[in-house]
Image (spheres, helix red, strand yellow):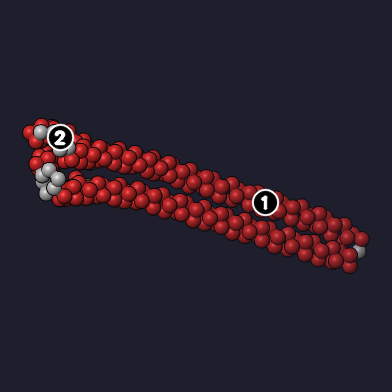
Amino acid sequence: MKGRVRGLLGGSPTNEAPDLAQGGQDPDAQRQALQVLVLAQRTADEHVAAAQRHVESIRAEARAAAEQISRDAQAHADGARREAGKALTDARATAEQIVRDAQAYANGVHRDAEKVLVDARASAQEIVKGAQANAAELDRAAQQRYDDVVGSLVGKRDALEQQIEALKHFDHEYRSRLRTFMHSQLRALGDDETPPTAKAGDAVTAAPAEGQASESES
């Protein structure tokens, strides 16, 4: 930005003030000063807009990652539930078949069938419990991953918001300094009652201070 300002004024900050003071009511000097102010405002606005676009991009990526994690977790849970349902259905079908076979035999075979039925039901319950525990573990893992991703993105968002606030503060300070400098130059150019030697000396004294402030802000 300092290079742009020097390019508009056609020289270093310490040499511009005497030219403006000696020019009196020179419209070229006024135009150059306004161009410097417009360029500074445009540059600050570009920095703020770029930072805001970066924040929006980070937020969009965070939402997309969270949605993908949720979809993956739901898919895992649905798969586990389907497997548990299939196992339970198979176990029940097997138990029912054993009951039908046992009823066709004698009373002694009937006792064996009852035992097999009890074992099958117990096995089905264990399968259901295991599937439910697996689904719960998958849900916890997905939630932990989601929390980790969102937590890291929140830190990045806070850092970017701090950078935006710093840029806004820089923009405010820079505009204020430029307005002060331009007002002092315009007052020096429009003050007809001050002797020319005094005007030139004051402009030369004020210009290096303002130039140094612009250098430090850049």
Q: Secondary structure at mark 1?
A: helix
Please report whichever mark, 1 or 2, sits nearer to the chain's N-terminal start.
1
Q: Position of residue 176 (x, y in %)?
A: 29, 38
Identity of the residue drawn at 13% across and 47% down: 26
Residue 32 in view here:
no
171 with respect to 33 (left or right): right
Q: Nearer the viewer, residue 164 or 76?
A: 164
Q: Amino acid at mark 2?
A: Glu
- Please state, as top left, top right, bottom left or bottom right, where the C terminus lies in the image: top left
Observer-side mark, 1 or 2, equals 2
Say if 142 sits above or below 183 in the image.
below
Q: Position of residue 2 (x, y in %)?
A: 19, 45
**Residue located farthest toward the left when viewing the structure as drawn:** 197
Which residue is disc 1 drawn over? 132
Q: Position of residue 212 (x, y in %)?
A: 17, 35
Q: Could you tell me if the residues under marks 1 and 2 are in contact, i.e. CB atoms within 8 Å?
A: no
Q: Position of residue 123 (x, y in %)?
A: 74, 54
Q: Nearer the viewer, residue 209 or 157?
A: 209
Q: Residues within 10 Å of mark 1 (few under 14, many from 20)?
A: some
Which residue is disc 2 drawn over? 193
Residue 155 in view here:
yes
Q: Secondary structure at mark 2?
A: loop
